[in-house]
Amino acid sequence: MFTWVEDRDLLYLKIDSFAKYAVEAYFTTRNGGVSIGAYNSLNLALHVGDKKEDVLNNRVKLANSLGFDSRTFVAAEQVHGGNTYIVTEKDQGAGVLDFQDSIPGVDALITAKKGIPLISFYADCVPLFFLDPVKRVVALAHAGWRGTVKKIARQTVLQMQEAFSSSPENIMVALGPSISRDYYEVNERVIEEFRRAFPWYKELLVYKGKEHYLLDLWQANILILEETGVGREKIFLSNLCTFGNPQLFYSYRREAGKTGRMASIIYLPESKD
């Protein structure tokens, strides 16, 4: 479902399950950029303290490898919430040159417009890629524990359904690299939020003692999607952990907050004449 792509010093993942429907979907690694120090080397986020010039150079390099103009990216603010946004031509370039110009207050971007690459940023949270191959609609959603509790995956599917008449049973979803249960230890306060949100919350937990647990965000989002009507056979998991692969991925938790961000990208190519 996910395959590795090497382009000189760049290394990223491609979602083959989407590619057969002529949809381009990718997840980057930390390799192949110009950022230094804690951001070494392909940091793609403007809001983490890296040099702006380096981030913009990284974005241009990635976009060139993928075959489109970095100025056409559309990025969301990503506030760990449950809000979604329908992207149109007027939004092209949002968040490209300045984080303050990102689409405000949302964690999911949805579009049916060709030629507009959506982009989101990650360093442990779950990247969700959505495709309705029937209605030709794509989306990205950012699901940390807060976004998972707010059911950002469900909200994205429902918005695709409302805005584009997508049927949940037609929608495909891929979960990209993110922190696995083995490394995601949380306290009782977080578990209480999951207890309130999900009757099946115990399925996600391994008790570590002293009111601490290991939490499975992958399984949480899979169950949310299934409850929303997405078939399990149409949900694809990368099984790659950001925390456990320091040579490949940034991890907010592993690096105690000072680190770069990978990116998820999804794109409906423009028709070729």
Image (spheres, helix red, strand yellow):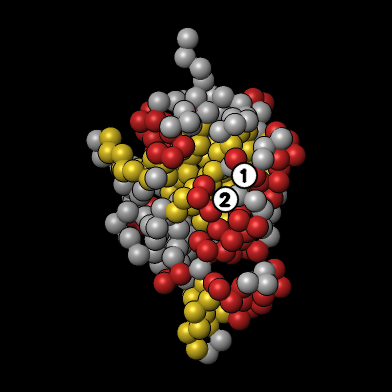
Which residue in the structure is indicated by mark 1?
169
Closer to us: 155 or 83? 155
The residue located at (33%, 60%) in the rendering is: 245
Q: Quadrant of residue 146?
A: bottom right
Q: Is residue 47 visible?
A: no
Q: Give residue 246's position: percent from left, percent from top.
A: 32, 60
In screen coordinates, is 65 left or right of 145? left
- Which residue is tagged 2? 231
Q: Could you say where residue 174 lies in the image, as x and y percent from the top left?
A: 49, 48
Residue farthest bottom in this picture = 210
Contact flag, marks 2 and 1 (Cβ < 8 Å) = yes
Residue 270 seen in the current view: yes
Could you say whether the residue bearing mark 2 is in a helix, strand or loop?
A: loop
Residue at 52% across, 90% down = 210
Task: Identify which amino acid the numbered label 2 is placed on.
Answer: Gly
| Disc 2 to disc 1, C-alpha distance | 6 Å
Mark 1 neighbour class, 10 Å CA radius: few under 14, some 14 to 19, many 20 or more: some
Image coords of residue 147 (percent x, y): 63, 58
> Badge 2: how crowded within 10 Å, few (<14), some, or many (20+)?
some
Q: Is residue 11 left or right of residue 83?
A: left
- Give me the residue at 60% from left, 49% from top: 230
Q: Quadrant of residue 99?
A: top right
| Residue at (61% x, 54% y) in the render | 225
Which amino acid type is shown beneath numbered disc 1?
Glu
Give the quadrant of the N terminus.
top left
Q: Helix or strand or loop: what does disc 1 sit on?
A: helix
Numbered circles on residues, count = 2
The residue furthest top is: 273
| For residue 38, side relative to residue 236 (left or right) | left
